[in-house]
Amino acid sequence: MLDLQNTRPSRSSSAPVSCRTTPRTANLNQPDETPKATALCLDQFMKLAAIAATGGHAKILIQGGEVKVNGQIETRRRRKLAAEDVVEMSGQRWRVKDYVAIQ
């Protein structure tokens, strides 16, 4: 059986902020540390808010121009959202701050 767990290349520490909620090296076994979202991407938010069933579904909706952020059509899946942003699709609106606390 092929072990894929240890075959990922390591990331440099100078990489730009990603949409991950915790760094890969975080030790979540420590009781003092709780994961904090530093950034939330549009496609992740759509899955979290049940706007899209899967990441692939979110990708199709976003790249198809069906999603607006703060009233403007957004076609970037990895657009970073802030707590005050509002996501719109098909006449419905979702406020990011209602779903997560972004630091």
Image (spheres, rainbow, N blue to C red):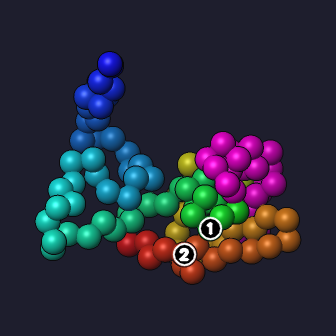
Give the residues drawn in magenta, as a range: 52-73
The local secondary structure at tag 2 comes to loop
Mark 1 is surrounded, within 10 Å at the Cα level, by few (under 14), some (14 to 19) or many (20 or more) other residues, namely: some
Find residue 95 and report its horizontal and vertical position in percent. 63, 77
Q: Quadrant of the C terminus?
A: bottom left
Q: Count the numbered circles shown.
A: 2
Depth check: 2 or 71 in front? 2
Q: Is residue 67 magenta?
A: yes
Depth check: 39 or 30 in front? 30
The residue depicted at 40 percent of the width and 53 percent of the height is 20
The residue depicted at 74 percent of the width and 74 percent of the height is 93
Find residue 9 and report its horizontal and vertical position in percent. 29, 27
Quadrant in the picture for residue 6: top left
The residue depicted at 69 percent of the width and 68 percent of the height is 87
Location of residue 24 with respect to 27 vertically, above or below: above
Q: Which residue was labeled with disc 2?
A: 99
What type is the residue that disc 1 sits on? Ala
Q: Is residue 63 magenta?
A: yes
Residue located farthest toward the right when viewing the structure as drawn = 91
Left or right of 26, for residue 39: right
Please report contact status of discs 2 and 1: CB closer than 8 Å, yes or no.
yes
Residue 26 in sight in this render: yes
Location of residue 70 with respect to 5 vertically, above or below: below
Q: Which mark is residue 49?
A: 1
Mark 2 is surrounded, within 10 Å at the Cα level, by few (under 14), some (14 to 19) or many (20 or more) other residues, namely: few
Quadrant in the picture for residue 42: bottom right
Quadrant in the picture for residue 39: bottom left
- Label 2 vs 1, first from the N-terminus: 1
What type is the residue that disc 2 sits on? Tyr
Location of residue 22 with respect to 102 vertically, above or below: above
Q: Quadrant of the N terminus?
A: top left
Query: Mark 2 to mark 1: distance in Å?
Result: 7 Å
